[in-house]
Amino acid sequence: MGKTYERIDGRLRTFIEEQPLFFTATAPLSGEGTVNLSPKGLKGSFAVLDERTVAYLDFAGSTAETVAHLRENGRITLMWCAFQGPPNIVRVHGRGEAVLRDDPRFEELLTHFPGIDPTPHGLRAIIVVTADLVRDSCGYAVPYMSYDSDRDLHERRFAREDDASLSAYFAKKDHIATSLDGLPGLPLPLPPLGAS
């Protein structure tokens, strides 16, 4: 049923690039900590950088668990599943890093996402994942569902924020600068976009 691959290319790359939705999973080192699982969407916010490296844009939200877990231990799994066409699930298990706005690599990484304007979405970081293990499996139990379009709610909500007001919004949230388990999360205030 399942198969292991050494790289993300060919059929695997095409499959994951065509999916409108994927999931990220991270966890703290503590066995008592909170496992985080998040859906990710918005067309153009995901990119395959090379045959072992992928990245996605980390936009404004109500927590920063992924950033906190990656800062602590770097472990991450990404998963895509086919809701249309032949059944398939692909998982990338690897090491991730949150590249923050003031990182010298930030601006170059941003060039890999020409299909989306990140400005109205409250871009916080770029998550870069290096694959240690790539696997696919059947997905026979995944239902058929149709993709109609991206929601415009995220853009409508965060387009009215500038860097200062976005930092103020994050500062009011309980789990942006600190995770649910007390780990350091997103450093605040946010550096302005283009600060690297």
Image (cartoon, rainbow, N blue to C red):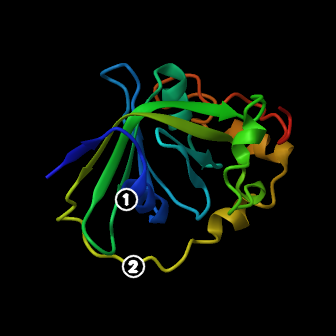
- Work out whether 64 lies above or below 145: above
Contact flag, marks 2 and 1 (Cβ < 8 Å): no
**Is tag 2's residue or tag 1's residue first in the polypeptide sequence?**
1
Q: Is residue 83 above or below residue 41?
A: below
Q: Which mark is residue 146?
A: 2
Work out whether residue 152 or residue 99 is closer to the camera in this orientation and state it.
99
Question: How many discs appear?
Answer: 2
Q: Is residue 13 above or below residue 106?
A: below
Q: Which mark is residue 103?
A: none
Name the residue rendered at 64%, 71% in the picture: 152
Q: Single out the mark in the foreground, 2 or 1.
A: 1
Q: What is the quadrant of residue 86 in the picture? A: bottom left
Q: Quadrant of residue 49?
A: top right
* Three-letter amino acid code at the position of disc 2: Ser
Determine whether, in the image, residue 80 is placed left or right of residue 17: left
Which residue: 61% across, 46% down? 58
- State the SS at label 1: helix
Task: State the CA–CA distance, disc 2 to disc 1.
Answer: 21 Å
Residue behind mark 1: 11
**Element at label 2:** loop
Residue count near mark 2 (Cα–Cα under 10 Å), binned few <14, some 14–19, many ≥20: few
Expressed as whole percent of the image width and height from the top left, the position of residue 18 reads 47, 65
Q: State the residue at coordinates (59%, 28%).
A: 185
Check the picture and name the quadrant holding the C terminus.
top right
